[in-house]
Amino acid sequence: MVGDRPLRRDIHLLGDLLGEVIQEQAGLEGFELEEQVRRLARARRAGDPEAEGALRALLEERARARQRRDYARADEIRRLLYERGIILEDTRSGTLWRRRRDLEKKDPS
């Protein structure tokens, strides 16, 4: 709609500003990870069949970070996924994931 253009422009401007802040505070690598998780969450919500594979790749990246004892990176991936609605559980047999229930749509009845 024509009336939505200023709002859309403002939202894009805020997104750009947020991206700049993330890059300043977390560096380019942190920004790229944030964008990867954002795109993954969006694709998953849209029902993209490739989203599951992308999630697995991110989980593998986290596992490699843990093996390197780069716990800051592993925790960052966990935090970003949690913010996008995915909970990770580390078990002896590997990492399991599930959707956050507090983000599921509530039945209004």
Image: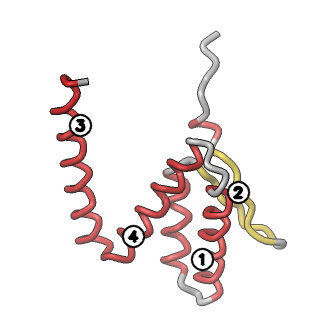
Pointers 4 and 3 in contact (CB under 8 A)?
A: no
The answer to whether mark 3 and mark 1 are in CB contact below 8 A is no
Please tell me whether mark 4 or mark 3 is closer to you in this view: 3
Task: Report the side of 92 relative to 36 (left or right).
Answer: right
User: Taking 70 as reference, is 97 above or below it?
Assistant: above
Q: Quadrant of the C terminus?
A: top right
CA–CA distance in space, label 3 to label 1: 34 Å
Q: Residue at x 20, y 56 (%)?
A: 17
The type of colouring in the image is secondary structure
| Amino acid under disc 3 | Arg
**Mark drawn on residue 97:** 2
Crowdedness near tag 4: few (<14), some (14–19) or many (≥20) residues, C-alpha within 10 Å: some
* Amino acid on which the number 1 mark rests in the picture: Glu
Circle 2 crowding by C-alpha within 10 Å: few under 14, some 14–19, many from 20: some
Q: Position of residue 4 (x, y in %)?
A: 22, 27
Tell me the residue that label 3 is attached to.
8
Which mark, by number, is residue 32?
4
| Along the line of sight, the residue nearer the viewer: 54 or 17 | 54
Q: Which residue is mark 1?
A: 61
Provide the secondary structure element on which disc 1 rests: helix
